[in-house]
C-alpha cells in the first residue's frame, strides 16, 4: 500500500479516535482504514494504536510517531500549495536556451517579463547548437530548427524564410547574376548549419522547387561573421531576415531574385512536457507568440514593396 496514504489514514485515526469516523471523513471503508494502519504497523514492527470495541487510542510510540507524521504531512501540504501557486502565477527561475540569431530579437520579451513578474528570474543561454534540452536542465528552448527528439513538445511561433541578398559593393565588383543558376559562379557565403549543405533550395512563382549548388570562400557557424562579411561586400548569402533587417531597410543590403522564395522554416518554442506546464514557462511562451506576430508582419513587408527595390 502507498506509504503516504497510510500515513494520512493513521493521522486521521489519531485525530478522530475511531476507524468508522475516519472512514466517513476520508470516504473509504472501515476495512480499508484497518488495512492501512496494519500495513504501517507491520512496516515499522510496532503497535501504534490500542484498539477496543468502543475506542481507538494511541500507544506511547504511536503518539511520538503521530507528532512526526503530522509535521511531515503539514509540510507536504504546504509543498502542494506552493506547487499549485507556481502553476498559476509566474514565479521562480526560468532556464531558457535561445539560438544566437534570435537572442537579440527575444530580448524585449525578457525585459517585459521580468518587469511584469518581479518574483521570477531568467537564466538565458544562447548558442548555435544545444545537445539535450532535458539533460542540460532547460525549461524552454526557442530555436529556428526542430529538434530530432520526438518526445519534446514543439510549438510554432513564426514561419520565416531566408533572404537571398548581397551588398551593392559586391555587385560593383562582380557581374550581376541574371539567373538562379548563375549563383554557382559567384562567391556564396554559407552558414554551416543550413540543412541542405551547399545546395540552396527555392520555389519559383509556380510553386515548383528549384535548387542551385554553390561554393565560396566562407563557411561559418557564426551569424555575426556571416553578417560582417556579407555587409562588407564579400559575397552573396542566404541570410535570416532577423539578422539583416536593418541593412535591408537602409539599402546597405539588397535582395536578389524576388521571383524565387527560399524554402520556409519556423521559429519554435520547445519544451519537455505539455501536462502541468508551469505558469512561468507558459506565460513566457505566450509573450513570445505576441512578439513573433510583430515579426511575422515584418516578414510580410520583406516580400512587398515596403522594403528597398530588389535587383535581379
Image (cartoon, grey):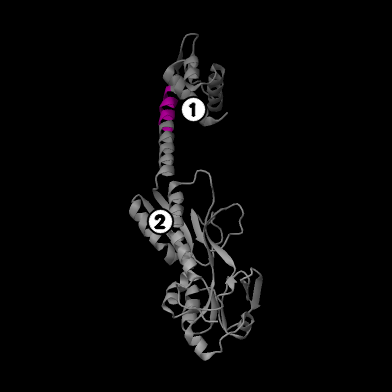
Residue 47, given in percent of the width and then of the height, sits at 51, 20
* The furthest residue to the top: 53
Point 48% across, 85% down: residue: 168
Residue 62, given in percent of the width and then of the height, sits at 45, 22
Q: Earlier in the sequence, mark 2 or mark 1?
A: 1
Q: Quadrant of the N terminus?
A: top right
Secondary structure of the residue carrying tag 2 is strand
Label 2 and label 1: CA atoms lie apart by: 38 Å
Magenta span dominant secondary structure: helix
Mark 1: few/some/many CA within 10 Å (<14, 14-19, 20+): many
Viewed as shown, does residue 87 lie left or right of 159?
left
Residue range corresponding to the magenta coloring: 63-72
Point 42% across, 22% down: residue: 63
Residue 138 visible somewhere in the drawing: no
Which disc, if any, is residue 228? none
Residue at numbered disc 1: 7
Viewed as shown, does residue 107 lie left or right of 47?
left
Secondary structure of the residue carrying tag 1 is helix
The quarter holding residue 87 reads top left
Residue at numbered disc 2: 122
Point 62% across, 86% down: residue: 185
Amino acid at each position: 500500500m502507498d506509504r503516504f496514504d497510510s500515513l494520512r489514514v493513521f493521522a486521521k485515526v489519531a485525530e478522530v479516535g475511531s476507524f468508522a469516523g475516519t472512514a466517513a471523513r476520508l470516504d473509504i471503508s472501515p476495512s480499508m482504514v484497518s488495512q492501512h494502519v496494519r500495513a504501517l504497523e507491520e512496516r515499522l514492527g510496532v503497535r501504534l494504536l490500542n484498539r477496543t470495541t468502543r475506542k481507538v487510542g494511541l500507544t506511547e510510540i504511536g503518539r511520538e510517531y503521530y507528532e512526526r507524521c503530522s509535521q511531515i504531512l503539514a509540510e507536504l501540504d504546504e509543498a502542494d500549495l506552493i506547487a499549485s501557486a507556481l502553476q498559476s502565477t509566474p514565479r521562480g527561475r526560468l532556464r531558457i536556451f535561445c539560438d544566437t540569431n534570435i537572442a537579440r530579437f527575444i530580448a524585449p520579451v525578457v525585459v517585459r517579463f521580468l518587469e511584469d513578474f518581479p518574483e521570477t528570474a531568467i537564466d538565458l543561454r544562447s548558442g548555435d547548437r544545444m545537445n539535450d534540452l532535458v539533460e542540460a536542465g532547460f525549461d524552454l528552448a526557442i530555436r529556428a530548427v526542430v529538434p530530432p527528439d520526438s518526445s519534446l513538445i514543439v510549438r510554432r511561433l513564426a514561419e520565416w524564410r531566408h533572404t537571398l541578398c548581397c551588398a551593392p559593393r559586391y555587385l560593383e565588383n562582380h557581374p550581376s547574376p541574371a539567373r538562379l543558376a548563375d549563383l554557382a559562379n559567384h562567391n556564396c557565403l554559407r552558414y554551416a548549419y543550413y540543412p541542405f549543405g551547399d545546395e540552396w533550395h527555392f520555389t519559383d512563382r509556380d510553386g515548383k522547387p528549384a535548387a542551385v549548388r554553390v561554393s565560396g570562400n566562407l563557411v561559418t557557424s557564426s551569424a555575426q561573421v556571416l553578417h560582417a562579411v556579407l555587409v562588407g561586400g564579400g559575397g552573396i548569402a542566404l541570410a535570416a531576415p532577423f539578422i539583416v533587417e536593418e541593412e535591408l531597410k537602409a539599402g546597405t543590403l539588397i535582395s536578389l531574385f524576388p521571383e524565387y522564395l527560399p524554402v520556409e522554416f519556423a521559429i519554435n518554442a520547445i519544451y519537455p512536457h505539455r501536462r502541468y506546464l508551469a505558469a512561468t514557462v507558459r506565460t513566457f511562451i505566450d509573450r513570445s507568440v505576441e512578439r513573433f506576430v510583430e515579426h511575422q508582419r515584418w516578414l510580410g513587408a520583406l516580400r512587398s514593396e515596403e522594403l528597398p527595390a530588389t535587383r535581379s
